[in-house]
Image: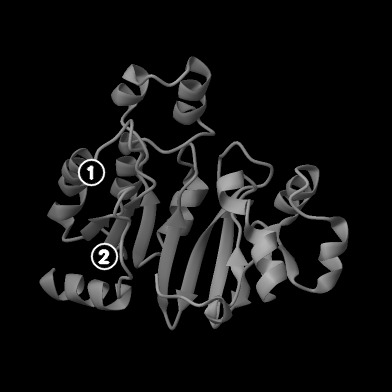
Amino acid sequence: MGLLPASIGGIVVTHEHDDHLGGVFKFSRRFGTPVYLTHGTWRAALRSQLTKPDYLQTGRVHLVETDQPFELAGLQLHPFPVPHDAAEPVQLLLSESHFTVGLLTDCGSSTPYLVSMLQQADALVLESNHCPEKLMQSPYPPSLKRRVGGNYGHLSNDVACSILKALVPGRLKHAVAAHLSQNTNCPELVARLWGEVLHPQGVTFDIACQLQGIDWLDLKNAVQQAGKAA
């Protein structure tokens, strides 16, 4: 993404699963980057031996509350709890100059509280992980199917669309579909389902698929253009 380690003001860890936390403390030790995570995620990292208790004394680890805003690199970050199979998982609102981006991935189901938080967002990165039918027909073992499709797993396309419906019409002007499974979803399906919800409301969206990901987006400009179009 064109970033140098020195340009990274901090790493915010939403939960302790290895694909999120595995390299964080090694990176922090090497480059001196501060790490922000909840108390529960810190304790889980200790249990998994991904770090050691004395690293807390370096001043690089910042323990945050699940519902208390904090500042980082000129942004106000407001974590909020979500249902996921982790110790103390959170997702985030990121705000700067009256502009707010919501982040919701790695979440198994919708709750009234997370919807109320996301209603503050001008733009949103939202998980649309799987199609329930494709998940059930996949070669995954039954235990993984139950985990992914359960209330503490990952958001299906249907639940993602229900969240989007709860947010429009409102502040939301642009969204990004994220965390799409390569095996149990496809960008074309997400594009159709999301389009049915968002296009009638004048909300634009992009899809960050597994292989290509997505480039940097000028979200303020995207929101302004969507507002003009509406």
Find disc 1 in the rendering and name its residue. 187
Q: Looking at the image, can residue 2 be seen? A: yes
Q: Nearer the viewer, residue 214 or 155?
A: 214
The residue at 60%/63% (across/down) is: 12
Find disc 2 in the rendering and name its residue. 173
Where's residue 224, x and y in %?
Answer: 23, 77
Q: Looking at the image, can residue 33 be seen? A: no
The residue at 18%/70% (across/down) is: 226
Where's residue 170, x and y in %?
Answer: 30, 61
Question: Label 1 crowding class (10 Å Cα cut-off): few <14, some 14-19, many 20+?
Answer: some
The residue at 41%/67% (across/down) is: 101
User: The residue under label 2 is which amino acid type?
Assistant: Lys
Q: Secondary structure at mark 1?
A: helix
Question: Label 2 crowding class (10 Å Cα cut-off): few <14, some 14-19, many 20+?
Answer: many
Residue projecting furthest to the front: 30
Say left or right for 189 vs 135: left
Tell me how the rendering is colored: one colour
Mark number displayed over residue 165: none
Residue 122, compared with residue 14, is above or below; it is: below
The residue at 56%/39% (across/down) is: 84
Q: Point out the image quarter for the C terminus.
A: bottom left
